[in-house]
Amino acid sequence: MGDRDDAQSGRQRPEAASSGPEEAARQWQTTFDAIGDGICLLDGEGRIVRLNRALLELLGLVPGEILGRPPAPVLNEALGLLDVPGLLPAIEASRRRHSADLQSDERWYRVTVDPADDELGRPAGAVLIVSDITERKRLEEQGRLAERREVEAGQLRDHIRRMTELERLKTDFLNLASHELRGPLAVLRGYLTMLEDGSLGEPSSAMRAALGVMRGKVREMNVLVNQMLETARLEDSRLVLHLEDLDLREVLADARRAVEAQVGPGHRLQFRPGSRPVPVKGDRARLVTIVASLLDNALKYSPEGGRVTCTLRARDRLARISVADHGLGIPASEVPRLFTRFGRLLNAETRGIPGTGLGLYLAREMARRHGGEVRARSAPGRGSTFSVELPTSG
Ligand code: ADP
């Protein structure tokens, strides 16, 4: 404590005694001590000859451990600053102010060395200032981080804006294309019916075969256009369900009729609707579309044929319609992607099979809007089972 008092008053210091009246030295020391940064004066030999209270506090040393020593080892011992020696020769050579921000453990210090001249302008040592700038550095770093985050957030916002715009364009396109295709398709369907029923003359057997193919293709186009329309409606939040009281067995029967034309010679389509009504509150057309789309897939993705079984069960206020096939199957890791818009599995086996990748997406979205869900269990080469779960209303 006594040493600290001495440091403040400047007593016991050789140069204080020899540099002028005691009173002036005391005043000088008072001013010196009032400065918040650690300051010391170096003599011509580079040794510390005076220091202020802030430096003592910063270093946690007493004047006896500092006075008469060069600053580099003192700062190294007290603060762990290793780079100070480099600063001192630099000012010797240039006689200009040098400053460096130095780090030790968790803290930052700015060490500044100013050359000092005597009253005749001759080099006479230096003033060394040590400031603890940890807080300033922390704030600067925080500022830089905040700036970087702001830039990143801006980039993310731009990206989201672009993605949203693209999504909107996609929906607009789906909307436009499906609306524009509906008209010509209706005309084609009309002429096809007239050709088939002989209104335009009795068709030959070769023409009948061609008409059968055309009917199938027009049906495919119809499904495609409807899927596009429904997707656009879903995304514009324009989809409205027309709910009515239904027996799910009727939904199964309608779906069966819708896919009958797709049943190939190698396929065996089995229905197990159960013997009791399964009441639900639902949009009939949409529920038929869900089941028809699962049946259609089961047939499409069983190119070698095989049994496709559609089962209806109800338990604990939950109805489950399962469609099981023995077709190509899907790796489990791919299943979630197939429920997204346009999600398709493209490989050598599926490449030639037509589709949009909208069927499962729509089936799940529609089921969810009925408070239900569509799930899949599948393994490559072993077939798949897709199930629709719906709350019953009975
Ligand atoms: P797509 O119009 O392509 O059939 P979906 O959305 O109905 O579109 O099905 C998405 C993809 O899921 C299909 O392209 C197919 O790869 C796969 N998939 C759907 N159902 C089956 C199934 N029963 N067996 C094997 N793969 C299927």
Image (spheres, rainbow, N blue to C red):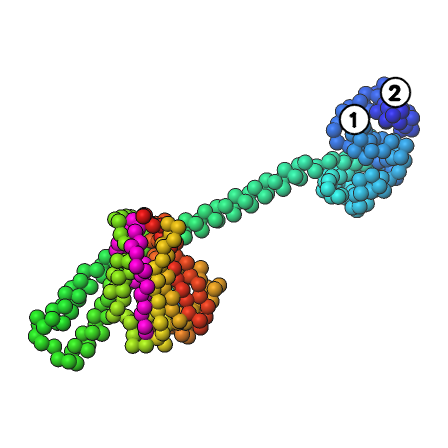
Q: Is residue 187 above or below residue 11?
A: below
Q: Which mark is residue 32?
A: 1
Which one is nearer the viewer's eye here, 202 or 30? 202
How far separated are the C-alphas under marks 2 and 1?
Answer: 15 Å
The answer to which image quadrant residue 336 occupies is: bottom left
Q: Position of residue 380 (x, y in %)?
A: 45, 70
Q: Which residues are magenta?
A: 267-295
Which secondary structure, mark 2? Answer: helix
Outermost residue toward the top in this view: 23
Assess disc 1: are there few (<14), some (14-19) or many (≥20) residues with their C-alpha within 10 Å of its C-alpha. many
Amino acid, disc 2: Glu
The answer to which image quadrant residue 313 occupies is: bottom left
Q: Is residue 88 above or below residue 375?
A: above
Assess disc 2: are there few (<14), some (14-19) or many (≥20) residues with their C-alpha within 10 Å of its C-alpha. some
Q: Residue at x 26, y 49 (%)?
A: 245
Q: Residue at x 27, y 66 (%)?
A: 259
Amino acid, disc 1: Phe
Which one is nearer the viewer's eye here, 135 or 131? 135
Q: Position of residue 269 (x, y in %)?
A: 31, 70
The quarter of the rendered structure image containing the N terminus is top right
Q: State which tag comes first along the sequence, 2 or 1.
A: 2
User: Which residue lies under the disc numbered 2?
Assistant: 22
